[in-house]
Image (cartoon, rainbow, N blue to C red):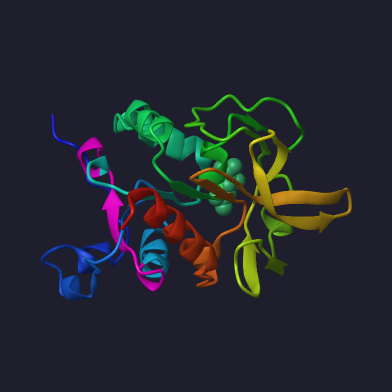
């Protein structure tokens, strides 16, 4: 059986033999970007800014020799199904249990949660990776038209970050081992949008769409600490 190859526009340019292969950083911690849906090049660029050697991850073999992993946004139900199809769900759960640092943005933050809820608070049955003691509410801020941008202070990141929220979740519950790094004010009160639990970092917004490298720097520092690079 052949493994299906998933591509994002322009990705081949960075491949080993692609025209921009030389621009692909090889120094620093090896951080993968899950490349089953999209937002891959944007994350690779921010990882390069953070001094990490980014690479795409589509198969179990790609998980080997990784010091850290980014789970981009998209549609968490679809990404969950694609992870199952690629046979990645169980190996990733094992790596996470072993302490692999993971940055999950938006749908990625949903995948890292122990439980997902629908926008109106019902259980959302879908495959998750888990790892964080969090409950997330999907599409919590409303529909696509309620997507928004704001400037946010995030603990551990210098200055403010321009945060792009697209059909974003919020983190409804955090367990005792989870640090809250940022909240957003809503008409219902402040809601958690960035949280950390050990080597796992979850953001409800898309730093890669605003070219904001702050969270990737914070994440790369965690990866370096863990892998002593
Ligand atoms: N609404 C998506 C989900 O529930 C997440 C949106 C995103 O990643 N921008 O999976």
Residue 176 percent location from the top left of the image: 69, 34
Q: Nearer the viewer, residue 54 or 196?
A: 196
Q: Nearer the viewer, residue 76 or 33?
A: 33
Side of 30 relative to 47 (left or right): left
Residue 99 percent location from the top left of the image: 41, 37
Residue 203 percent location from the top left of the image: 59, 52
Q: Which image quarter: residue 206?
A: bottom right
Side of 95 relative to 139 (left or right): left
Residue at x 50%, y 51% (from the top left corner)? 73
Q: Which residues are magenta?
A: 48-62
Q: Is any part of residue 163 visible from this angle?
A: yes
Residue at x 32%, y 52% (from the top left corner)? 32
Q: Nearer the viewer, residue 181 or 187?
A: 181
Side of 180 relative to 87 (left or right): right
The single residue placed furthest to the left in the displayed view is: 17
Number of numbered discs? 0
Q: Which image quarter: residue 113?
A: top right
> Residue 25, relative to residue 219: is it above or below?
below
């Amino acid at each position: 059986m052949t493994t299906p190859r998933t591509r994002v526009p322009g990705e081949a340019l960075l491949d080993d033999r692609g025209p921009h292969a030389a621009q692909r950083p090889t120094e620093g911690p090896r951080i993968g970007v899950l490349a089953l849906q999209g937002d891959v090049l944007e994350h690779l660029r921010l990882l390069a800014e953070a001094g990490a050697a980014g690479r795409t991850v589509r198969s179990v073999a790609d998980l080997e020799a990784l010091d850290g992993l980014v789970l981009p946004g998209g549609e968490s139900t679809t990404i969950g199904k694609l992870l199952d199809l690629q046979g990645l769900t169980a190996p990733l759960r094992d790596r996470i249990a072993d302490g692999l640092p993971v940055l999950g943005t938006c749908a990625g933050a949903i995948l890292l949660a122990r439980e997902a809820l629908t926008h109106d608070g019902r259980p959302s049955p879908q495959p998750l990776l888990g790892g964080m003691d969090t409950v997330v509410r999907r599409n919590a801020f409303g529909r696509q038209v309620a997507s928004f941008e704001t400037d946010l202070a995030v603990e551990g990141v210098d200055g403010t970050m321009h945060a792009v929220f697209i059909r974003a979740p919020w983190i409804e519950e955090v367990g005792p081992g989870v640090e809250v790094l940022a909240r957003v004010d809503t008409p219902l009160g402040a809601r958690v949008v960035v949280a950390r639990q050990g080597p796992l970092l979850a953001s409800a917004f898309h730093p890669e769409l605003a070219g904001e490298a702050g969270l990737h720097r914070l994440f790369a520092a965690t990866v370096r600490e863990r892998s002593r690079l």
